Image (cartoon, grey):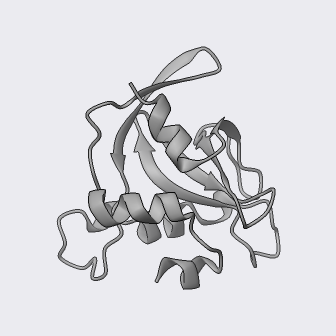
Amino acid sequence: MLEDYFEIPLPDDYKRFVTTHNGAVPLESRFDVAGLERAVERFLPIIQDVEGHPLGWLDLEVVASQLDSRLTDDEDGENINLVPIAAVLAGDFIVLDYREGSEHPTIGLWDHEASEDFAPAVTTVARTFNEFLSILR
């Protein structure tokens, strides 16, 4: 299970969403960040057996392992701070942001161009996953 892999609890609202809409392409996908319109391409699926699965390359755990040190500011590599949950057009990701604690992560936009190893660039877009869903249009 992902919670064991990341060693953090996933928010209940996100877990409910994944149970029903695992890997969904949203009909309402646009949202604004710092005055710019962005769009969710797809929510990352959680796949038990990625090998041979048509969306295996988009599996949440696969994406997180590819981005690896760009998703944390912990140079010891013991703690992940950001969990990618949705692909955004142009190579960025919506993330669960655990940098302020593991109980209630905020939702952020991770910028692939501005992020470096152990220096992720994230802009907060919502306080909760449900709030993020409510801003999609």
- Where's residue 2, x and y in %? 50, 77
In this rendering, would 88 be left or right of 7?
Answer: left
- Of residues 9 and 37, the one nearer the viewer is 9
Give the total number of marks visible in the rendering: 0
Residue 100 image-quadrant placement: bottom right
State which quarter of the image contains the C terminus.
top left
Q: Residue furthest top?
A: 35
* Image position of 46 with respect to 124: above or below: below
- Of residues 118 and 39, the one nearer the viewer is 39
In this rendering, would 133 be left or right of 77?
Answer: left
Q: Name the residue rendered at 60%, 55% in the picture.
A: 96
Q: Name the residue rendered at 75%, 79% in the picture.
A: 78
- Where's residue 112, x and y in %? 58, 42
Residue 103 image-quadrant placement: bottom right
- Where's residue 18, x and y in %? 36, 62
- Of residues 116 and 53, the one nearer the viewer is 53
- Where's residue 66, x and y in %? 50, 64
Q: Name the residue rendered at 29%, 56% in the picture.
A: 21
Residue 73 image-quadrant placement: bottom right
* Image position of 119 with respect to 5: above or below: above
